[in-house]
Image: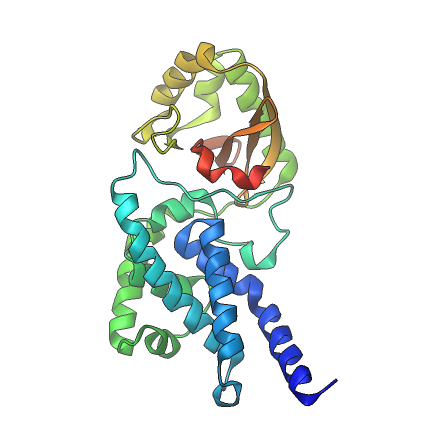
Amino acid sequence: MSETNFAVDQYVREFEQHRGRLFGLAYRMLGLRAEAEDIVQETYLRWHAADHETVRSTEAWLVTVATRLSIDRLRALQADRVSYVGEWLPEPIVDDRPDRNSDLRDDISLAFMHVLERLGPEERAAFLLHEVLDTDYPEIARILNKSESAVRQTVHRARERVGKDRRRFEVDEAQHRALVGRFVDAVTRADESALMALFTENATWTADGGGKVAATINVLHGNAILTKFLVGIRNKIPTGLAMNFAYINGMPGLEIYRDGRPFAAYAFEADGDKISGVYAVLNPDKLQGMN
């Protein structure tokens, strides 16, 4: 093997070591898998063409490029999100257990990422870099071309807007399966008392149909409202549905198919033995990963 080929292989290996981290960052920034994969690919192309002799830290270089690309892309996408019909939820990542990928183990729940939509592109980047990727303030300042004091203020503001809604619960798969099973049973039977007992008093229902399928436009609040809603739509639920327990962005949930095609992904925010939030992705454009 020539020295040139050896060097190229080395740079490829270095990039692959950080691919998962880069995807995790881009996905948390954009909420769309294909967009995140495009960011990773563009970062690789720039890495391939870079003057590697001048790179002091491969990880810092790659994170900087991926962050800046993600900020630019999010700015471009925001116009569409402003005019989006109803609530905007990320494209779900469906798995059979919550901890398969260490780079996506924490802070990708639909609940958390829905809250991130409150933040502007640079604010979101600064918050994720510091709170999720443990990047220090001087490094974030370099990445964003801002002063360290400005970055500290940005992260502080973002933490104020996100922190109070950022909830964590221990993973207990048996408990999660039982909870989801109770939900399916209660909805199937249109059992009002069971549904009322299943949800916390202040439970919420957030749905994303994107204007392409029937879905609630606004967030529903309160177990009484959620119960009334679910009982009301019971007879409108289409036939031919197959529901499987799955983890949706690390949250216990359901992947739902109709006649073999992706129909919906439901993620449940569980508070002990009760459900405190339901996040329902029904926009067919966001369900391609379920195929």
- Report the coloring of the rendering: rainbow
Point out the image quarter for the N terminus. Answer: bottom right
Quadrant in the rendering for residue 119: bottom left
Q: Residue at x 33, y 76 (%)?
A: 141
Seen in the picture, residue 119 relative to 205 is either above or below; the reply is below
Estimate the x, y position of residue 184 in percent, counting from the top left.
55, 21
Residue found 57% across the figure and 69% down from its top: 18
Residue 250: percent from left, percent from top: 55, 45
> Relative to 168, does residue 238 appear above or below in the rendering?
above
Q: Is residue 113 above or below residue 62?
A: above
- 214 sits to left or right of 169: left
Residue 41: x percent and y percent?
51, 63
Residue at 68% across, 83% down: 6
Q: Is residue 70 left or right of residue 289?
A: left
Quadrant position of residue 182: top right
Q: Is residue 192 visible?
A: no
Quarter of the figure that contains the C terminus: top right
**Closest to the observer, 258 or 250:** 258
The residue at 57%/28% (across/down) is 261
